[in-house]
Image (spheres, rainbow, N blue to C red):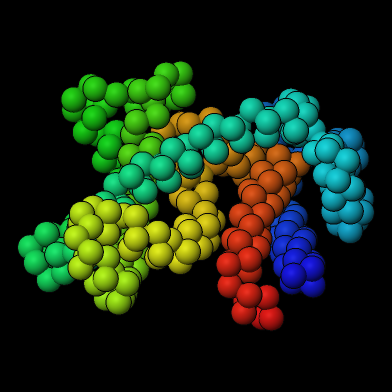
Amino acid sequence: MGAFLLRRLALAVFVVFVVTLLVAWAIRLSGDPAMMLADGAGSITEQDLRNIRAALGLDRPFTAQYLGFIGGMLRGDMGHSFMGGTPVARMVAQALPLTLLLAFLSLGVSLLASIPLGVQAAVHRGGWADQTIRIISLIGLSFPNFWLAIMMVLVFSIALGWLPPSGAGSLSALVMPVLTMATILTATNVRLVRTAMLETLSAQYITVARSKGLAETVVLYRHALRNCAIPLITYIGLQFGGLIGGVVVVERVFNWPGMGSLAFDAVAARDYPVLQAVVTVLAAMIVAVNLLVDIVYGLVDPRVRTE
């Protein structure tokens, strides 16, 4: 087990390293932050631009800039924003909890909806309930998250006036972002639960449980669902990366002040330290969740440890 953990940990560190390296290289192709800072300042000479680059540390070679960023991250220092000089660590600390709140609430709502729907679809395989649930989930999969978010704003904010269109000042502001993400997730998770339950319901121990006179609810949720939980947990863990990616887009539509909005603003301003920090933190979270899934799966199924 020790060798298995070391291999997975080494792979996780390597993935984060590659992601941060690619992001650091790519964002430097997007433009010159010195030009953004000098925009609107009147007559700017080339010497002024060089002075701005030197003040921002952009006159150093790329390797030196990247290693300085990694070294600072390891010390907990993410640098300072080019726009205003705010410590990036403070900006991330303010935005990250809001993103995590949105992500986990969306996942929770999705599970509360998809588990009973998936179970019912499997129990009534081929019936009208199964067909209806599958059609609805297919429609849900067809909706891009940004389109669904815009439709939510048009209907519930503009047309009906029930919910605030943006911001994070109240609990009501959570409703539309959470429903948008939960709808997309539920469409996928319903089909996953249905498939897993179909395989489990055909097992012999389910027939035995029913022959003992156990209530159908007990058979379905205490026996069948528990025994197909491992692949469901594995998939949900792996789904976390897509969830974070979807949250980033939805945050921008609803002007939710999380990591997604922070990343969009950093891209527009070519704010290298902020964008690098956001991508690094999100990548580390995704890799950490996937690593945790690998570890749990290795504990449950010893055969995985040899892979």
| Residue 200 percent location from the top left of the image | 32, 71
- Residue occupying the point 33% across, 34% down: 176
Vertical order, 150 against 293 (above or below): above
| Residue 264 percent location from the top left of the image | 56, 41
Of residue 164 and residue 184, the one placed in the foreground of this image is: 184
Of residue 111 and residue 38, the one placed in the foreground of this image is: 111
Residue 173, picture quadrant:
top left
Residue 89, picture quadrant:
top right
Vertical order, 190 against 253 (above or below): below
| Residue 210 percent location from the top left of the image | 21, 65
Q: Quadrant of the N terminus?
A: bottom right
Among all residues in the image, which is located at the extreme front? Answer: 212
Q: Quadrant of the C terminus?
A: bottom right
Of residue 301 and residue 193, the one placed in the foreground of this image is: 301
- Residue occupying the point 61% across, 35% down: 96
**Residue 142 showing in the rendered view:** no
- Residue occupying the point 46% across, 18% down: 169
